[in-house]
Image (cartoon, helix red, strand yellow):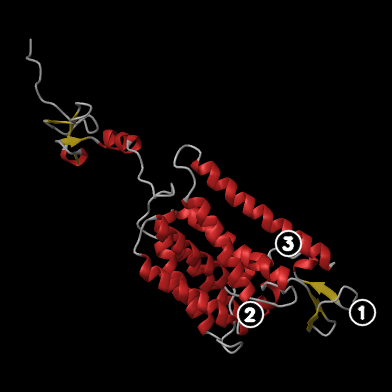
């Protein structure tokens, strides 16, 4: 009778001799299967199981912590791609800019809105059911040779988004940050619709003002040194006043207010199981309010 073999092999690679056991499941593992652990080595399956059982780190508002501000990068890329599209096909601006109410003439021109219009004219804008303009206008910018700023319009906006967005995204987490950005953009467009429906507007400024409001609220929530933050907010509000004669102050103010409301709800929601529900409910309530206001204004214009 032959003696029993004492050679041990890896449980994942039966042909590979091994003498090291996984410290968690006690199975033999070869060098290719060894994963460094706090004590000894573990097999790949135990490492995966351990990762699933570890509680994920969260931001102060309950979002998942991410080292890379992916959403900010994607938003900047979308704005830049939209701008390239404008350069290639300028008609994109007329088709997708924020416009509450206007008239398209038989000659292809654009005219001031009036509820009763001559034959051959067609309504255009949100009043004609083009609701997408409330968001698409926030991803467009002035062509290089138009307006007060030209190409500086998108350059300044994207620089601001780069500086502010990366900070706020890491504080809120990706999902909450994206909700903040879109609701701020929508808030800016709705205030334009309410106060200046006949004025065509473009730009991410409303959304960026919302991110600026979030930066301020989160700084207070986190107990940061407010001296620098207050100076930043003073500059932001000063620009809001200066821009009243140069750009759409309604879009800036609407974004600032919407962003502030969203971030207050995110930052000061109860820190228990109700937190996500309260945060989502506040965002949905703001969305509902903005929709109601937009519908009311369109009904009044028509």
Residue 266 vs 111, above or below: the answer is: above
Counting other residues with Cα less than 10 Å from the Cα at mark 3, is it few (<14), some (14-19), or many (20 or more)?
many
Percent from the top left, x then y, of residue 170? 39, 57
Mark 1 = which residue?
Answer: 118
Q: Is residue 274 above or below residue 73?
A: above
Q: Residue furthest top?
A: 1
In the picture, measured across the screen, residue 157 lies left or right of residue 123, that is: left
> Along the line of sight, which residue is nearer the eye, 266 or 20?
266
* Quadrant (top left, top right, bottom left, bottom right) of the C terminus: bottom right
Residue 139 coordinates in the image, percent (x, y): 58, 70
**Is disc 3 placed on a helix, strand or loop?**
helix
The residue drawn where x is 87% and y is 78% is 121
299 relative position to 235: left or right: right
| Label 1, residues with CA under 10 Å away: few <14, some 14-19, many ≥20 | few
Regarding residue 263, the answer to whether it shows in the image is: yes
How far across and down, in percent of the image, does residue 50 sit?
29, 35
Q: Mark 1 or mark 2, which has the lower sequence index?
A: 2
Task: Judge depth for marks 3 and 1 and give the one in front.
Answer: 3
Q: State which mark lies toward you, 3 or 2.
A: 3
Q: Are marks 3 and 2 in contact (CB under 8 Å)?
A: no
Residue under label 3, please give it.
294
Q: Which residue is mark 2?
A: 89
Q: Residue at the spot x=73%, y=56% of the render?
A: 292
Q: How many labels were placed on the picture?
A: 3
Quarter of the image for residue 113 reads bottom right
Cα distance between the residues tagged 1 and 2: 29 Å
Measured Cα–Cα span from mark 3 to mark 2: 29 Å
Task: Say which label, 3 or 2, has the lower sequence index.
Answer: 2
Cα distance, mark 3 to mark 1? Answer: 26 Å
Q: Is residue 132 left or right of residue 225?
A: right
User: At 74% across and 71% down in the image, what residue appears?
Assistant: 100
């Amino acid at each position: 009778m032959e003696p029993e073999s004492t050679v041990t092999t890896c449980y994942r690679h039966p042909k590979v001799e091994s003498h090291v056991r996984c410290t968690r499941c006690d199975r033999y593992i070869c060098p290719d299967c060894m994963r460094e652990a706090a004590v000894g080595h573990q097999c790949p399956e135990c490492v995966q199981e351990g990762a699933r059982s570890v509680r994920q780190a969260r931001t102060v508002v309950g979002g998942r912590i991410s080292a890379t501000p992916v959403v900010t990068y994607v938003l900047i890329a979308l704005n830049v791609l939209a701008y390239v599209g404008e350069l290639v096909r300028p008609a994109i601006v007329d088709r997708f800019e924020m416009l509450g109410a206007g008239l398209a003439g038989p000659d292809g021109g654009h005219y001031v809105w009036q509820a009763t219009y001559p034959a051959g004219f067609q309504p255009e804008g949100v009043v004609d059911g083009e609701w997408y303009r409330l968001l698409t206008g926030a991803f467009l910018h002035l062509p290089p040779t138009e307006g007060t700023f030209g190409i500086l319009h998108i350059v300044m906006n994207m620089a601001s988004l780069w500086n502010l967005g990366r900070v706020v995204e890491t504080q809120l987490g990706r999902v909450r940050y994206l909700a903040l950005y879109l609701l701020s953009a929508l808030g800016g467009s709705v205030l334009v619709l309410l106060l200046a429906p006949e004025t065509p507007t473009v730009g991410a400024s409303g959304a960026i003002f919302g991110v600026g409001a979030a930066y301020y609220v989160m700084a207070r929530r986190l107990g940061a040194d407010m001296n620098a933050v207050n100076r930043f907010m003073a500059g932001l509000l000063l620009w809001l006043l200066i821009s009243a004669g140069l750009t759409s102050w309604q879009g800036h103010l609407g974004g600032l207010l919407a962003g502030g409301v969203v971030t207050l709800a995110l930052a000061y929601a109860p820190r228990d199981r109700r937190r996500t529900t309260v945060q989502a409910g506040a965002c949905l309530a703001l969305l509902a309010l903005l929709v109601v206001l937009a519908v009311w204004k369109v009904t009044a214009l028509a």
